[in-house]
Amino acid sequence: MIRTLDELAVSGDAIGVRVDINSPIGQDGRLDDDARLCAHVETLSELADRGGRVVVLAHQGRPGGDDFTTLESHAARFDELLSFPVSYVDATFGSSARKAIESLDPGSILLLENTRFYSEENMSFEPSTAADTHLVSELYEALDLFVNDAFAAAHRSQPSIVGFTERVPSYAGRVMETEIDALGEIEARPSPRVYSLGGAKVDDSIEIAETVLQSGLADTVVTSGVVGNTFCYASGVDLGPETESVIKSRARDRLDLAEQLLERYPDRIATPTDVAIERSGERTELPVTALPVDEPALDIGTQTIASYADIFETAGTVVLNGPAGVFEEDRFATGTKELYTAATAAGYSIVGGGDTAAAMRQLGLSGFDHVSTGGGAALAMLTGEPLPAIQALDDGA
């Protein structure tokens, strides 16, 4: 059984807290967005307020990426966000990290260095093996308790995610608890359930469509963005060379599956009936019957928005994953704005994290029942896939 902070007694204990604060980084190497840091304020504040000596583990970026950097600026931002002192040490385990933990006062917070600076953290392990990695084996003795609040990384089986649960008493933080409550039993949410799949991650979205339709998690799948264009193409629509070039680069070997899904579920997959293109510098809408055209499809059109809004209005649950178009440009943000707004009329509305949540924030949209902090983790849970972090908490010490 997964324990929560309600069951955790703190008395000067050193508490390792895994968070996910992987954030956009600007050219100056500093944070461009602190939304993920803000999400963990409740958990960290609660533990510090109880007198815990809070030791935070986190990652930023991946090796080789432009955003693969230290957590020094994250620590500085946490110090601004929290009403408890926050310090930083440029080590994750070893003597300097352990000394910093030993000298930590009750009610204070220490952010350790980027866990992914160490090669083991970029690999996947079973929990028992993860517990024997250097990162865990050299750090766990300095900790009395472990809290996993990193839902956005819950679909990973890396040492800092699943290893400590084998060594010290472990609990779910408030972010993790909230996400499990909101997403953990999607099949129990009101029906009809509608999954809105958009954005440019076409391969993943086609596989998600297959999973949720086949399992009965979704009554209807509506498609937009590059995903919608791909399903249109799979249905036989000639979209024009520019749009089809994008589809073929994104869909890879999943176009056949998209065609099969349309054959298997002809009444349960909705595809765009009109699209928006840029012509003479203006947004121009065309029915798909007027295609092909040379210009790429950059958004869904007014007719599609209206038909999808009707589906959302009668839905018991709507899951939003991915924008409906190139929302970064005002002219082509209409579909995303209108669809997201329409989704709030459903009985229960879920924003699936990642790019979807970023679009919501950029467009200033609100009113959803749950906005997930995790992209891949949220989708895994919303398709019924078990998450290693949650299993580790359930099975751990």
Image (cartoon, helix red, strand yellow):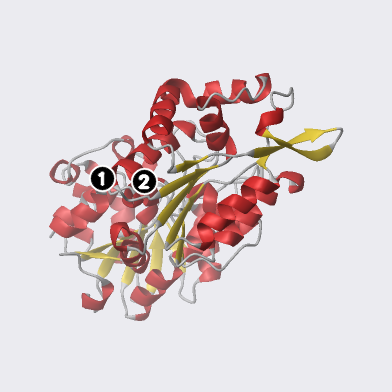
Q: Secondary structure at mark 2?
A: helix
**Picture coordinates of residue 220, whole percent (x, y):** 43, 48
Q: Residue at x 33, y 36 (%)?
A: 122
Q: Which residue is mark 1?
A: 159
Q: Is residue 365 above or below residue 382?
A: below
* Residue at (68, 44) in percent of width and height: 301
Instruction: Tell me: 250 left or right of 376.
Output: right
N-term mark: 1 or 2? 2
Question: How much space separates mark 1 and mark 2, taking CA atoms?
Answer: 9 Å
Residue 337's quadrant in the figure?
bottom right
The reply to whether the C-beta atoms of the residues labelled 1 and 2 are less than 8 Å apart is yes
In the displayed structure, 38 sits above or below 387; it is: below
Foreground pick, 152 / 325: 325
Element type at mark 1: helix
Q: Label 2 belongs to which residue?
A: 115
Q: Residue at x 46, y 72 (%)?
A: 85
The quarter of the image holding the C terminus is: bottom left
Q: Nearer the viewer, residue 113 or 231?
A: 231
**Which residue does the image show at 53% across and 47% down from the upper left?**
355
Instruction: Tell me where residue 72 appears, x and y as whole percent.
Output: 51, 53
